[in-house]
Image (tube, rainbow, N blue to C red):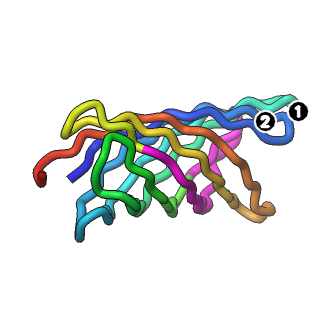
Amino acid sequence: MMIGGTAGFSSSDGTTEISVAPSLGFFIIDQLAIGGQIAFASTSSDLGGDATAFGVGPMVRYYFNGEGKARFFAQGMFQWSSLKFGDADAVTGTAFGGGAGVSIFLNDHVAIDGLVGYTSSSFGEGDAVGSFGINFGVQAFIGGN
């Protein structure tokens, strides 16, 4: 089992976002974990207005190498989300994303993650909005060897 999460920063078209996403995953086979993630993001735009988003959904992570201090992985996620602009009513939508990263193991059970990825979000009747980002996090690995 792995438990942890990421914190991130992304910027696209004059919009800046800070995010936090705790996650929990279970290894169903060696190097492949499936689990869930909860995400919270706060966004500021040069066009004016702030927004907050909350999402929850499944995630999957595959490690390409099962040994060594640096372990490379690919990760994907899907989320059902709620987005609120200022005092307006919240709108619901979906988001999906993926990326590649590396876990640097500090010991047998704790790793620091770096992930570069892309996320596409769609809310209400609006067009999908994509963004690239860099996330950093910590994972704890429980059980196994």
| Mark 2 / mark 1, whichever is N-terminal | 2
Mark in the foreground, 2 or 1: 2
Magenta residues (range): 82-102
Residue hosting label 2: 15
Number of marks present in the image shown? 2
When asked about the image quadrant of residue 70, the answer is top left
Q: Is residue 68 above or below residue 106?
A: below
Q: Classify 77 as above or below 7.
A: below
Q: Residues within 10 Å of mark 2 (few under 14, many from 20)?
A: some
Q: Residue at x 24, y 60 (%)?
A: 26
Using the rendered view, name the quadrant where residue 3 is placed: top left
Q: Nearer the viewer, residue 123 or 107?
A: 107
Examine the structure image and report whether residue 139 is included in the region drawn in magenta: no
Q: Marks 1 and 2: in contact by CB < 8 Å?
A: yes
Instruction: Give the secondary structure at mark 1.
Output: loop
Callout 2, which amino acid? Thr
* Residue labelled with disc 1: 47
Most extreme residue toward the right is 47
